[in-house]
Image (cartoon, helix red, strand yellow):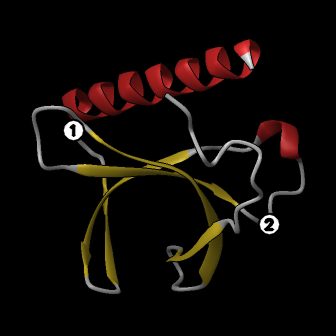
Amino acid sequence: MTNEQIGQEEEPEIIYIPDEEGNEEEFEVIMKFEVDGSDAKYMMVVPLDSEDEETDEVYAFRYEEDGDDLQLFMIENDEEWAIVEETFNTLVDELDGGAENG
């Protein structure tokens, strides 16, 4: 099984999320995934304007798409957060493992 995206430079997906004061901040979407057994879709994003790339915080949101309209929802439930974190870590491990074998 081959992944056709390996080695290709993709345009990063940029989204704008308003902060507490309503100022829109730019975030790059680093991963989107669905959780098995549910209809929920999640995305992991990092701030674009971070000064220190070593300490980039990763934010997770549940999202729904309606055509071009994207709605983000905070993950406030500990159980939901644990599922998202586990799925994210599993996907990252798979990506890291796949990179070493190639």
Residue drawn at 56 percent across, 17 percent down: 93
What is the crowding at mark 1: few (fewer than 14 residues within 10 Å), some, or many (at least 20)?
few
Quadrant (top left/top right/bottom left/bottom right) for the C terminus: top right
Q: Which mark is residue 49?
A: 2
Percent position (x, y) of residue 38? 11, 40
Amino acid under disc 1? Asn
Kind of residue sitting beneath label 2: Asp
Residue at mark 1: 77
User: Residue visible at 54% across and 82% down?
Assistant: 21
Measured as percent of width and height from the top left, residue 71 is found at 30, 74
* Residue that extends furthest to the front in the rendered view of this protein: 1
Residue 11 against residue 59 in the figure, above or below: below
Q: Nearer the viewer, mark 2 or mark 1?
A: 2
The percent position of residue 80, horizontal first and vertical second, equals 22, 34
Residue 89, how many percent across, how many down?
49, 22
Residue occupying the point 56% across, 26% down: 92
Q: Earlier in the sequence, mark 2 or mark 1?
A: 2
Q: Is 37 situated above or below 22?
A: above
- Residue 2 vs residue 61: left or right? right
Distance (Cα) linking label 2 and label 1: 28 Å
Q: Secondary structure at mark 1?
A: loop
* Residue 61, label in figure: none
Q: Is residue 24 above or below residue 1?
A: below
Q: Nearer the viewer, residue 2 or 63?
A: 2
Q: Is residue 32 above or below residue 47?
A: above
Residue situated in front as seen by the camera: 15 or 95: 95
Disc 2 crowd rating (10 Å Cα; few below 14, some 14-19, many 20+) is: few
Secondary structure category for the residue under label 2: loop
Q: Quadrant of residue 73?
A: bottom left
Asked whether disc 2 touches disc 1, contact meaning CB atoms under 8 Å apart, the reply is no
Residue occupying image coordinates x 38% and y 21%:
86
